[in-house]
Image: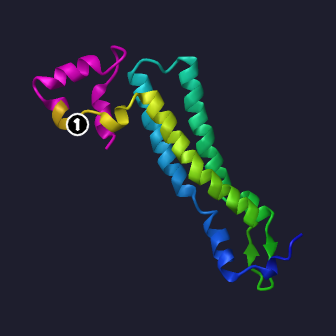
Amino acid sequence: MLNMNLRPPWSYTTTYQRCSYKCETDVGDVLIGATAQIIDLNGVAKVSHIKDKLVEMANLNETVRGSSLALASAYEGWKMKSDVQMNDSIQANVCKQNVTRFPNEIASLAQDLEGGLLDTKPSELELEHSDIGPLIRKFLVGHDDADVDSIKSYG
């Protein structure tokens, strides 16, 4: 094993910081939930390749969550002379690589699944408009039981 005591001091901060990306997964949870609701509005929630992509989004998000909780890096870490437990820098860098790639893949899958609706959804003003609102409600959904007004909550 490499003598970690020879590392420059700034690298210790980097190692700890790279294990602290759990907040990214909270954004992923919201995006996955919004995508699932739009898939349901479109009436395609039971289509197998749609479900596969939604599962892939959850898998990517949970991979980031797992590595960001620093379980692996803390388990394979080492104790410094000061009694500070130092995370394993390799595992911490794996977390960093996951968090720089996977949220973008999740967003790409979301855009594919929801057809751009999260980016181009009608505003509340358009939904309430006397002429445009009924047309949006008629053509935006894929099944009769869909609640178009539920998309107002997506920011």
Q: Nearer the viewer, residue 1 or 75?
A: 1
Q: Is residue 6 above or below residue 133?
A: below
Q: Residue furthest top?
A: 144
Residue 66 relative to residue 77: left or right: left
**130 falls in the magenta region:** yes
Q: Residues within 10 Å of mark 1 (few under 14, many from 20)?
A: some
Residue 148 in the image: state x and y as whole percent.
Answer: 29, 26
Residue 122 relative to residue 70: left or right: left
What residue do we see at 58% from left, 48% from top?
Answer: 101
**141 falls in the magenta region:** yes
Q: Is residue 20 above or below residue 140?
A: below
Instruction: Please state the extent of the stretch shown in magenta in the rendering.
Output: 127-155
Query: Considering the image in quadrants, where does the C terminus appear?
Result: top left
Residue 7 in the image: state x and y as whole percent.
Answer: 75, 79
Residue 3 relative to residue 127: left or right: right
Residue bearing the label numbered 1: 123
